[in-house]
Amino acid sequence: MTLKPWSECAARLVDVATGRSPADMVVRGARWVNVHSGEILGRRDAAIAAGRFAAIAEDLSYAIGPDTVVVEADGRYMVPGLCDAHMHVESGMVTVTEFARAVIPHGTTSMFIDPHEIANVLGLPGVRLMHDEALTLPVNIFVQMPSCVPSAPGLENAGAAIGPAEVAEAMTWPGIVGLGEMMNFPGVAAADARMLGEIASTMQAGKTVGGHYASPDLGRNFLGYVAGGPADDHEGTRLVDAVTRVRLGMRAMLRLGSAWYDVASQIKAVTELGLDARNFILCTDDSHSGTLVHEGHMNRVVRHAIQQGCKPVTAIQMATLNTAAHFGLERELGSIAPGRRADLILTSDLVTLPVETVIARGTVVAEHGRLVVDVPPYAYPAAARGTVKLGRPLTAADFEVAAPAGAGEEVEARVIGVVENQAPTRALTRRLPVRDGKVETDPKEDVCRIALVERHRGLGTLTNGFVHGFGYDRPCAIASTVAHDSHHMIVVGTDRDDMARAANRLGEVGGGVVCISGGEELALVELPIAGLMSDERAEIVAEKAAKLVAAMQLCGCRLNNAYMQHSLLALVVIPELRISDIGLVDVTKFEKVELFV
């Protein structure tokens, strides 16, 4: 339903609470998970009117009229609808609408999305597309204006650029809740005028500044970063990261995505050190479509936090009230309390958290894992398609690496090292063989090829390098136009012919992910919207994504969610070594480095 501001329905809420008017819905006989007091209160009713909670009390039978919908809780727990504090819809390979369809049955009723993927391809118009789509949906989807496009100026070239003027404009849009993750942490620490200008525009609008400090160095640069204004950070991986952020007044966002497992190490700040749990927030950051359809969303993160020793009510607070308070929306959502949006879950167990009924804005939207409301597809315009421009057909020769002059039978090369279940990579060096003046891979040491193909302007240029950790042991190539954050094309493979075929195939279909082995296409996920998102249903995309995972495994890969690892190899704001359209980038020093040592 379309939700009216509180001011327009306050009188109705008062009338329902006092018995002068019947409620639209009454949830009867639930155990009330009260995230304000940290209690579980037995046998309560919740009266809902105009999409908001009007009253919660032991007996609200007086609010039941002839047209009131009564939902029998039968002693189940009544939990606030879950909130994802930081995430990227595009990582699910689907549109905002399809993402919502996938996560609503898992109990997610509020999302704070940062569409910086589409911003890197289409700029401000792309952000507006996703913003406007979000406003059409039956759940709460707020948008954080992307801050770093490109994420690291001078180290990569994106398809568009965003600066303080664009940020200031976006702050006037109705669905914008703040500034997206400020990834250019060296820029903030150096008092870069552009970065501080974006932060100032956000603060002047009274909105929240998202953080992203992806360095283990918690010294002067970190102090400078915090002084620059970011209010939260999701890039912590260690206990000390969470503790330090909270002590300096930030909110520590602990993420469990498809490939990022950062909750267990950091939640000890609450479970063992006893820090104030109000300053810790759970989020997903990046969730693959397969994870959404088969494993869950924020319910999965809450379960995981509980498994790490967090009290159930505390874990729920971290995924509801804490999130709402952080974005200045505590009076709107995040709890079951009068005046708030009527978003709730009914569950029979707080530890395993089966999501049995989902109510959003006073409407039952899902039952037992199934959507029960119609959420029609959203049509993206032609301007959002046809964004993959290779400039020319690529050949195997494009993926050759010439040995440096005077090289013997071996050369020492810099190699990107994949770290399973974490976003950072390692900066490795390996001795690689040279044949006929060309540098070859080393399958025994799990070193294969990586190339970044420029795809925004059709320049026909590539950057070649080497990567360790995927385990590919047969001729193959995996190409993707999802390549955080500038979203060129990443091709990883052991065979140059397959790499050329894979790149050209994505040019044909307008973007996506493809796995080719021995000239045969094993799997393809088409992503025609900005080369990032499918226009198909989430279930179909998840099925194609599962075939992709199986194809990568057939080629020898054993990493958990290897595709997510693949898609981040160009993310030049997370240490240690990355690849971009200008070359290899040392992200500990933020400078371009040569392939050969």
Image (cartoon, rainbow, N blue to C red):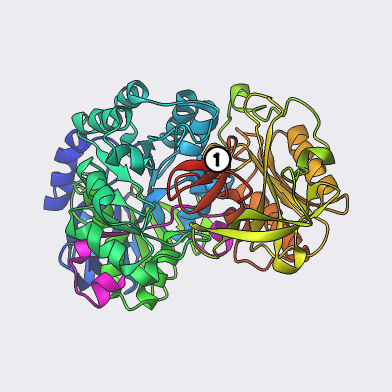
Coordinates of residue 429 in the picture (x, y in percent): 60, 59
The residue lying furthest to the right in this view is: 519
Which one is nearer the viewer's eye here, 295 or 360? 295
Quarter of the image containing the N terminus? top left
Q: Amino acid at mark 1?
A: Thr
Asked if residue 197 lies left or right of residue 265, the reply is: left
Q: Quadrant of residue 121?
A: top right
Q: Which residue is mark 1?
A: 95
- The residue at 42%/58% (across/down) is 107
Does residue 295 show up magenta in the picture? yes
What span is colored magenta in the figure? 267-296
Residue 301, magenta (yes or no): no
Image: 274 above or below 329: below
Q: Position of residue 414 (x, y in %)?
A: 61, 53
Residue 480, horizontal then vertical, whole percent: 67, 44
> In the figure, is residue 438 to the left or right of 595?
right
- Give the percent coordinates (x, y) of residue 300: 45, 66
Q: Is residue 374 visible?
A: no
Residue 179 or 247: which is nearer the viewer?
247
